[in-house]
Image: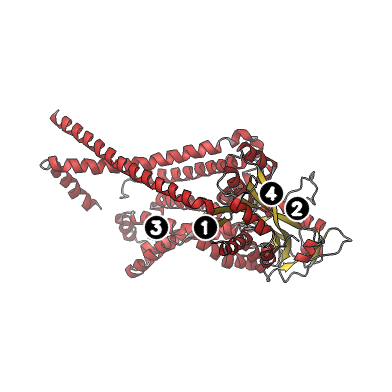
């Protein structure tokens, strides 16, 4: 019995100690949080959070760096992650500008409205999607219809396109990429919104642009697509025509701006509500002086 | 091992009597904190599983079962057929075990039974180093070195195939298989070997007909643990298997691209809006993966416990 009492005392003691330790820990954490909040408040007026499309991320970074050099009081942080990620973050109010390589979907706009945010769209540059093959492949021009048939699996040998007798290996970005959705809607479905065509299940989905370019470089059977800014010199770019009669056009800033290259798209930035203050200044700068940087990164400037 | 056990037991017995006053307090403290840590591990696993269920179960009433267990995976267009992913994971895992099992068991036999002492001392730490190579490094190696080799030597359309993934996974599960199998061989009593040699068996006959069969439950455990390692691997697999969600139904599919459950979750989780159908579908795949690995580990654990009841083995 006496031993039991002793044990009880010890248990009580232990509980007390634990409680004390816990209190200390909680106290410390509380303190930290406070200082963090204070810091955040001090910095936030000059910080622009910019997140989204991986296609746009290099251009957005270049803009941010140059703008920060000219306006040292402004801090701009740029992160990638994909168009959907950026838009979701803008809807949740964690970033002020979302980068996107596609338009916002209707559900996304509805979700933003439900959150009390009215997204505003800006077209900041244009991008051409280049169709690329291995340099040793003799095929150098295709129509949109042919590309569509290749990616749905209807054509599966290069000899059907005037090339060598080799199987065709299809490469694509992952299904979360804005480029994937654009390519599907405008090339595979040829812009027909009623079409139910999908990528062939044999399509290799590569987690990165680098994955695509390394496979294109090494494997003569491959065909792939990516933003013009990501095409390296060791890939062969295919000239594309709208239909059998049309001219076959290589993608370049000129052919995108005069509308002859058929696979080009606008790139967007979205803000939560009409931009004000620093964010407005920044976007104004991007739409005017910032356009000089666009062509350096392989994209197409607005005018 | 047996020598150590006896004195330990007696020392704890004697300690309890005289110094009870001072030592029980600290002992109690240490004991209870260890207990809390131990139980919290179980608690965390339970919590993670509950979280998985909460996020993943909705998919099973949001879309029809015909859709979930269909043969096409196009999440962007609300087609969530998980069959190609499940089969893809199973295909790559089984292929990797078929490669790793003979290699692993032979290496274990060599290290434990054949190699002289000094070789063993070099080999054992080297095998453990093998386990420490980050999988993304192996994935990079696989993508740039193994995939082109597979393509040119096997005349496959592309080097990013199930086979390439299986090769990498086999390499990754080898350390687990070797060390567990080696422990199993180690646990075979010396009397078995002595008896076999006394009956006139050669060294080779002893190893192949006596020692390896006696250690078979341990080797089975090694294989199950290796499988658990292989099925959960993500990064390397995502980099080398091509991630095409096609049904791997024929033998030929081994040399075609394949998409695994883990790679799907990793590749798509970053982009989905939380709470969407696609998000729930990815967690649904997580649940399936959890259950699969749970059963594999359960079978492995069963084999381990069975070994304990068998006489003679440690």
Does residue B74 appear anywhere in the picture?
A: no
What's the chain of the residue with tag 1? B
Q: Which residue is mark 1?
A: B169
Determine contact: label 1, label 4, CB under 8 Å: no
Q: Which residue is mark 2?
A: A152
Q: CA distance from mark 1 to mark 2?
A: 31 Å
Residue A21 lies in quadrant: top left
Q: Residue at x 15, y 32 (%)?
A: A3
- How dense is the environment of label 2, judged by Cα within 10 Å: few (below 14), some, or many (20 and up)? many
| Precedes in sequence: disc 4 or disc 2 | 4
Label 1 secondary element: helix
Q: Which residue is mark 3?
A: B179
Q: Which residue is mark 4?
A: A121
**Residue B20: x percent and y percent?**
13, 40
Determine contact: label 4, label 2, CB under 8 Å: no
Q: Residue at x 38, y 47 (%)?
A: A32
Q: Which mark is residue A268?
A: none
Residue B82 lies in quadrant: top right
Nearer to us of marks 3 and 2 is 2
Q: Residue at x 77, y 45 (%)?
A: A196
Q: Residue at x 31, y 60 (%)?
A: B198
| Precedes in sequence: disc 1 or disc 3 | 1
Determine contact: label 1, label 3, CB under 8 Å: no
Looking at the picture, tell me which residue is in the foreground, A137 or B171. A137
Q: CA distance from mark 1 to mark 4?
A: 46 Å
Q: CA distance from mark 4 to mark 3?
A: 59 Å
Label 4 secondary element: strand
What's the chain of the residue with tag 3? B
**Residue B206: x percent and y percent?**
38, 59
- Please determine if labels 4 and 2 lie on a single subunit: yes
């Amino acid at each position: 019995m006496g031993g039991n009492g002793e044990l009880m005392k010890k248990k009580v003691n232990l509980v007390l100690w634990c409680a004390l330790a816990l209190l200390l820990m909680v106290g410390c954490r509380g303190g930290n949080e406070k200082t963090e909040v204070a810091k955040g408040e001090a910095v936030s007026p000059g910080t622009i959070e910019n997140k989204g499309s991986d296609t746009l991320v290099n251009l957005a970074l270049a803009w941010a760096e140059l703008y920060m050099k000219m306006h040292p009081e402004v801090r701009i942080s740029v992160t990638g992650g994909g168009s959907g990620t950026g838009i979701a973050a803008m809807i949740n109010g964690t970033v002020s500008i979302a980068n996107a390589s596609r338009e916002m979907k209707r559900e996304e706009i509805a979700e933003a409205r439900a959150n009390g945010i009215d997204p505003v769209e800006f077209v900041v540059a244009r991008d051409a999607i280049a169709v690329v093959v291995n340099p040793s492949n003799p095929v150098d021009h295709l129509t949109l219809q042919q590309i569509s048939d290749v990616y749905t699996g209807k054509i599966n040998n290069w000899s059907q396109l005037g090339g060598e007798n080799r199987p065709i290996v299809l490469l694509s970005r992952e299904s979360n990429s804005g480029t994937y959705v654009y390519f599907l809607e405008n090339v595979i479905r040829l812009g027909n919104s009623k079409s139910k065509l999908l990528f062939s299940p044999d399509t290799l989905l590569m987690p990165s642009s680098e994955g695509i370019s390394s496979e294109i470089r090494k494997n003569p059977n491959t065909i792939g697509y990516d933003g013009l800014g990501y095409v390296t010199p060791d890939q062969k770019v295919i000239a594309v025509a709208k239909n059998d009669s049309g001219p076959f056009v290589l993608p370049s800033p000129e052919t995108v701006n005069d509308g002859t290259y058929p696979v080009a798209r606008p790139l967007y930035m979205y803000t939560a509500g009409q931009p004000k203050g620093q964010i407005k200044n920044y976007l104004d700068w991007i739409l005017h002086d910032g356009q000089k940087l666009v062509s350096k990164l392989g994209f197409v400037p607005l005018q | 091992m047996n020598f150590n056990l006896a004195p330990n037991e007696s020392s704890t017995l004697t300690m309890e009597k005289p110094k009870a006053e001072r030592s029980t307090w600290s002992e109690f403290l240490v004991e209870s904190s260890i207990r809390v840590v131990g139980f919290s591990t179980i608690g965390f696993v339970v919590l993670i599983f509950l979280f998985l269920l909460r996020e993943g179960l909705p998919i099973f009433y949001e879309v029809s079962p015909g859709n979930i267990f269909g043969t096409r995976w196009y999440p962007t267009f609300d087609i969530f057929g998980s069959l190609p992913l499940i089969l893809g994971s199973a295909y790559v895992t089984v292929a990797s075990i078929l490669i790793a099992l003979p290699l692993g068991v032979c290496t274990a036999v060599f290290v434990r039974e054949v190699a002289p002492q000094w070789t063993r001392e070099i080999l054992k730490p080297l095998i453990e180093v093998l386990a420490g190579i980050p999988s993304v490094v192996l994935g990079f190696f696989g993508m740039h070195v193994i995939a082109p080799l597979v393509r040119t030597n096997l005349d496959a359309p592309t080097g990013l195939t199930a086979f390439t993934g299986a090769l990498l996974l086999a390499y990754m599960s080898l350390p687990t298989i070797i060390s567990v199998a080696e422990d199993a061989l180690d646990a075979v009593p010396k009397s078995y070997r002595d008896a076999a040699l006394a009956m006139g068996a050669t060294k080779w006959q002893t190893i192949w007909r006596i020692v390896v069969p006696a250690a078979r439950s341990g080797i089975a455990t090694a294989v199950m643990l290796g499988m658990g390692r292989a099925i959960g691997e993500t990064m390397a697999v995502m980099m080398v298997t091509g991630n095409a969600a096609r049904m791997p139904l024929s033998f030929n599919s081994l040399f075609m691209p394949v998409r695994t459950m883990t790679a799907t979750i990793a590749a798509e989780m970053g982009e989905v809006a939380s709470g969407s159908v696609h998000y729930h579908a990815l967690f649904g795949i997580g649940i399936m993966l959890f259950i699969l690995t749970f059963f594999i580990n359960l079978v492995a654990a069963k084999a381990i416990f069975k070994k304990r009841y068998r006489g003679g083995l440690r």
